[in-house]
Image (cartoon, rainbow, N blue to C red):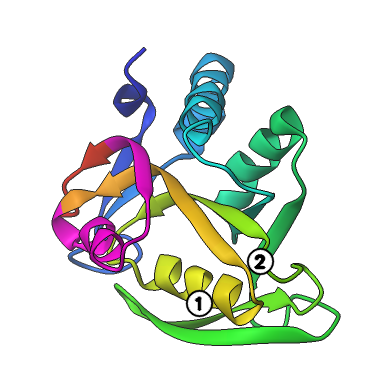
């Protein structure tokens, strides 16, 4: 099954010049979604990790299914002011703006290893912020797995340069 066939491309969303890769068309197809989860689970076997972290919001969809299958705890990395207890926060740049991502301070124990899952990597700002949150929490990033790598936007390569292990299922150009 070619998962690329299930990704809808929307030009000029959320702003002019952006070609948005929409995973809702993949998720709504039960066979494509199941295949996606199976591929993430298979790729995750390359790494040793204690917990899975999901990046808000589309990362939750994939990471929760993987967490269930692998019987690993799930940590949610959320947008600012979405977590009710004490948090660590990291501000970062997006391709089309700025944002803040947070983690509960009690999500990790010292030296917990964490697999970070998200739907897509573009410029890498969100992924780098997620890694910082894990490290601020005294955990270690085991690896990243993305469904989509927008290869020409540089985020994947930036993570590799920072010595993170990175996997993806499919690739598209970013524009």
Using residue 50 as the reference point, say whether residue 37 is left or right of it: left
Residue 7 position in % (x across, y down)? 36, 34
Please give left or right for residue 164 compared with residue 106 in the image: left
**Image: 151 above or below 122:** above
Q: Could you tell me residue 91's position as x and y percent? A: 49, 87
In this view of the protein, which residue sits in the foreground, 111 or 133?
Answer: 111
> What's the magenta region?
152-170
Left or right? Give the position of 20 relative to 153.
right
Q: Is residue 111 above or below residue 66?
A: below
Mark number, residue 20: none
Q: Residue placed at 77% from the left, 68% from the top? A: 107
Pick out the residue farthest to the front.
Answer: 111
For label 2, the residue is 111
Q: Are marks 2 and 1 in contact (CB under 8 Å)?
A: no
Pointer 1: what residue? 132
The residue lying at 18 percent from left, 61 percent from top is 153
| Earlier sequence position, callout 2 versus callout 1 | 2
- Residue 68: quadrant of the picture: top right
Q: Quadrant of the N terminus?
A: top left
Q: CA distance from mark 2 to mark 1?
A: 14 Å
* Number of numbered callouts drawn: 2
Residue drawn at 31 percent across, 23 percent down: 5
Front residue of this view, candidates 41 and 54:
41
> Label 1 crowding class (10 Å Cα cut-off): few <14, some 14-19, many 20+?
some
């Amino acid at each position: 099954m070619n998962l690329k066939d299930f990704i809808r491309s929307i030009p000029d969303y959320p702003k002019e010049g952006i070609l948005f890769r929409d995973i809702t068309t993949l998720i709504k197809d039960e066979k494509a979604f199941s295949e996606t989860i199976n591929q993430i689970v298979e790729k995750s076997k390359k790494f040793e990790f204690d917990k899975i972290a999901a990046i808000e919001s589309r990362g939750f969809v994939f990471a929760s299914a993987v967490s269930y299958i692998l019987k690993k705890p799930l940590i949610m990395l959320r947008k600012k002011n979405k977590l009710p207890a004490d948090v660590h926060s990291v501000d970062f740049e997006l391709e089309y703006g700025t944002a803040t991502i947070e983690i509960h301070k009690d999500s990790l124990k010292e030296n917990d290893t964490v697999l970070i899952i998200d739907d897509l990597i573009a410029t890498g700002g969100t992924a780098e912020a997620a890694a910082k949150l894990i490290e601020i929490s005294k955990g270690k990033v085991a690896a990243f797995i993305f469904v989509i790598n927008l290869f020409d936007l540089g985020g994947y390569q930036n993570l590799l340069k920072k010595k993170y292990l990175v996997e993806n299922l499919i690739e598209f150009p970013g524009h």
